[in-house]
């Protein structure tokens, strides 16, 4: 009898917590992005307007408001993230297949090599990479930043993709071989469709990781390559309004990507995930 | 349809030898069962024939072709898996058509052959279902159809019924046997279920520790097991250790160490030879009063029984030996009851302890 009314209450509490954690900070960010004047002790902004948005989107140029056009940084971010995601997944998927399905003699070594950049603090690694990148002419260039993003993302991409392949029973591949499919055909026709949901999750994760990557870009990209997180960083210290605008802009590609991939999910893919 | 031949096939996993110099010829259109406990090498051997496992040594032939190093997709086999292994993202039709499409057959022929294969396993009309919409029995029927639709040279089945419930399992045994006969296909069937092996096989290969313990028809395996292992693995069996004390043209007498003298019919045994006597329950006559004819009659005591419905599964003490028999439930009164058993001399299985064939 007790459980009947406890369940909805628990559910309401859970939803409340979710709203508080996700929507709470977000609403404050939205408020900040339109606040022209907002001083203590006022609970809400005294004056609101779209001046910072207009400035950020390059629709106006007003020296009284400390904000710059974000289009260049946005363009950089998109190019870097898309290219880095494509290359990362192109490397991660075969690597994941090999790790999940093949008997590799040096599997442990390979995995360790993958983990290496993550077990050390990031900053010293990037600082030490700087002279190397400079020698190769990659420091402060888009390809250089892409390379750094790929290095950072490859671990996550491979990790999640590996579990996507591992979740597929061996016998499904063997069944394909027994009816005449080569290893290659079995990979494309059986394993890839079945791993697709997991690979998609992996792709989203890699994309978002690249989009918000900070440390590597900071050391190896600035001042010549500016991405959205760089702008956000430099704005966050002194300019809450501009930082809020940037934060919201950064959300857009992630949300778009989520919506897009959700449409690609087919029920039978999800069905195979839940198996 | 061709023979399948294995010559000295060996497969090791680390220090464990899963298959140990196994040689065997499976005849055309024959249904052979690999039977044995888990870890006996039966599945590994089957997977060697399929090509999923490459043996460390030895050769495998399908027909005249040495397939030892040929990948599975070029062996022209059909394989049925224990977990069905239907592709969950494809419908029944797509599952069956997959192999045919790889062979680039015309659409019409694919449709016909899928239809025929589904009719064969009585699954017509379920073409558009996804595997998850089917019951276990239906899934295994589709898996069977998928293996047969390509008309393979050899059908390999890896414990295909062990994921099904008991009743369905019994039905499917007959269906599989029927299909194999109808299609006249060479088939190898792996199981740890002796009843399945007895029903399904032309010949049974009993495996233990990666080696063949015995090859024979179900009757041969049951009536004349070559070793204690085979006798205990197939059917219920009780054992007594003894040695030969008289071996003449008329009779052969065995004596157990606790002094029971037992007459048997086995020939060619030398005096003093140590043997194991294997006793099937159905060849032991039990009476509640002392029989007139006292040949091979011993006193026994009922020490334990289990209710099986019509019959009781009874443990008797004969001398120091445990002997299992099945008795009608109505006739057993209480534990420690005194009984007499008569061991039919013609039916006692005598296994020389060195493991030499009779």
Image (cartoon, rainbow, N blue to C red):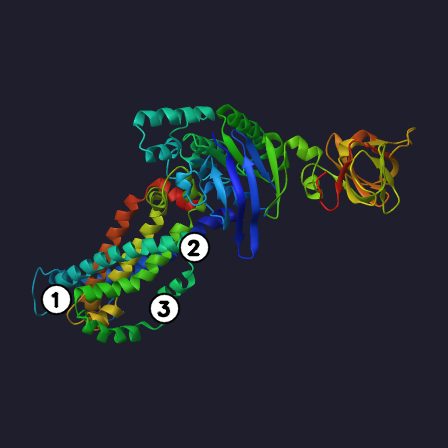
The chain letter under disc 3 is A
Q: Is residue A258 left or right of residue B327?
A: left
Quarter of the image where one finds residue B153: top left
Q: Label 2, label 3: how many angstroms apart (C-alpha)?
A: 22 Å
Q: Earlier in the sequence, mark 2 or mark 3?
A: 2
Which residue does the numbered mark 1 point to in the structure image? A68
The image position of residue B59, as x and y in percent, is 49, 44
Residue located 30% across and 76% down the image: A124
Compare residues A82 and B174 and report the one nearer the observer.
B174
Residue B336 picture location, percent across and down: 87, 41
Tell which of B213 and B150 is nearer to you. B213
> Quadrant where the C terminus of chain A lies?
top left
Give me the C-alpha separation between circle 2 and circle 1: 54 Å
Q: Is residue B132 above or below residue A225?
A: above
Dot 3, how many residues are within 10 Å of its Cα: few (below 14), some (14-19), or many (20+)?
Answer: few
Could you tell me which secondary element the residue under label 3 belongs to? Answer: helix
Camera sees residue A102: yes
Q: Which residue is mark 2?
A: A103
Above or below, comparing residue B132 to residue A220 in the picture: above
Q: Give the chain of mark 1.
A: A
Residue labelled with disc 3: A116
Q: Earlier in the sequence, mark 3 or mark 1?
A: 1
Q: CA distance from mark 3 to mark 1?
A: 38 Å
> At 39% from the left edge and 40% from the top edge, which residue is drawn?
B73
Helix, strand or loop at mark 1 = loop
Q: Are marks 2 and 1 in contact (CB under 8 Å)?
A: no
* Viewer-side label of 3, 1: 3
Instruction: Determine crowd level at label 1: few under 14, some 14-19, many 20+ residues with C-alpha closer than 10 A.
Output: some
Is label 2 in a helix, a strand or a loop? loop
């Amino acid at each position: 009898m007790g459980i009947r009314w406890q369940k909805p209450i628990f559910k309401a509490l859970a939803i409340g917590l979710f709203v508080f954690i996700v929507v709470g900070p977000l609403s404050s960010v939205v408020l900040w992005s339109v606040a022209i004047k907002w001083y203590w002790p006022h609970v809400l902004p005294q004056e609101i307007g779209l001046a910072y948005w207009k400035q950020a989107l390059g629709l106006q140029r007003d020296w009284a408001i400390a904000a710059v056009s974000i289009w260049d940084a946005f363009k950089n971010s998109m190019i870097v993230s898309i290219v880095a995601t494509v290359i990362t997944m192109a490397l991660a998927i075969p690597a994941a297949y090999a790790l999940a399905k093949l008997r590799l003699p040096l599997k442990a070594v390979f995995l360790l090599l993958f983990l290496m950049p993550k077990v050390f603090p990031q900053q010293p690694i990037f600082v030490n990479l700087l002279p190397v990148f400079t020698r190769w002419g990659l420091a402060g260039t888009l390809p250089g930043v892409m390379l750094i993003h790929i290095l950072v993302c490859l671990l996550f991409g491979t990790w999640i993709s590996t579990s996507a392949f591992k979740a597929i029973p061996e016998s499904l591949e063997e069944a394909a071989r027994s009816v005449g499919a080569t290893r290659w055909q079995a990979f494309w026709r059986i394993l890839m469709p079945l791993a697709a949901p997991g690979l998609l999750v992996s792709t989203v994760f890699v994309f978002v990781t690249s989009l918000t990557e900070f440390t590597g870009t900071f050391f190896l990209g600035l001042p010549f390559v500016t991405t959205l997180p760089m702008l956000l960083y430099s704005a966050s210290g002194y300019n809450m309004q501009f930082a809020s605008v940037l934060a919201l802009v950064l959300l857009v590609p992630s949300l778009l990507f989520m919506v897009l991939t959700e449409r690609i999910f087919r029920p039978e893919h999800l069905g195979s995930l839940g198996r | 349809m061709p023979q399948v031949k294995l010559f000295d096939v060996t497969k090791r996993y680390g220090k464990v030898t899963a298959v140990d110099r196994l040689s065997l010829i499976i005849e055309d259109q024959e249904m052979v069962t690999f039977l044995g406990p888990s870890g006996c090498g039966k599945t590994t051997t089957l997977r060697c024939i399929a090509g999923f496992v490459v043996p460390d040594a030895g050769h495998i032939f399908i027909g005249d072709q040495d397939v030892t190093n040929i990948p599975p997709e070029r062996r022209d086999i059909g394989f049925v898996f224990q977990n069905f292994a239907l592709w969950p993202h494809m419908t029944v039709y797509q599952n069956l058509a997959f192999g045919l499409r790889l062979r680039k057959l015309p659409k019409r022929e694919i449709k016909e052959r899928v239809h025929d294969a589904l009719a064969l396993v009585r699954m017509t009309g379920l073409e558009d279902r996804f595997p998850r919409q089917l019951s276990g029995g239906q899934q295994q029927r589709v898996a069977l159809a998928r293996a047969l639709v390509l008309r393979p040279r050899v059908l390999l089945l890896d414990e295909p019924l062990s994921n099904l419930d008991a009743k369905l399992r019994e039905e499917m045994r007959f269906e599989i046997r029927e299909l194999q006969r109808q299609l006249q296909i060479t088939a190898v069937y792996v199981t740890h279920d002796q009843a399945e092996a007895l029903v399904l096989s032309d010949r049974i290969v009993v495996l233990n520790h990666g080696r063949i313990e015995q090859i024979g028809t179900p009757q041969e395996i049951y009536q004349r097991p070559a070793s204690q292992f085979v006798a205990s693995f197939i059917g219920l069996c009780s054992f007594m250790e003894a040695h030969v004390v008289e071996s003449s043209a008329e009779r052969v007498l065995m004596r157990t160490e606790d002094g029971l003298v037992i007459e048997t019919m086995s020939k060619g045994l030398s005096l003093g030879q140590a043997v194991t006597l294997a006793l099937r329950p159905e060849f032991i006559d039990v009476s509640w009063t002392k029989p007139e004819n006292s040949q091979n009659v011993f006193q026994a005591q009922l020490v334990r029984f289990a209710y099986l419905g019509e019959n009781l599964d009874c443990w008797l003490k004969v001398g120091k030996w445990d002997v299992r028999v099945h008795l009608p439930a109505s006739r057993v009164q209480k534990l420690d009851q005194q009984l007499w058993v008569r061991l039919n001399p013609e039916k006692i299985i005598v296994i020389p302890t060195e493991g030499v064939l009779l």
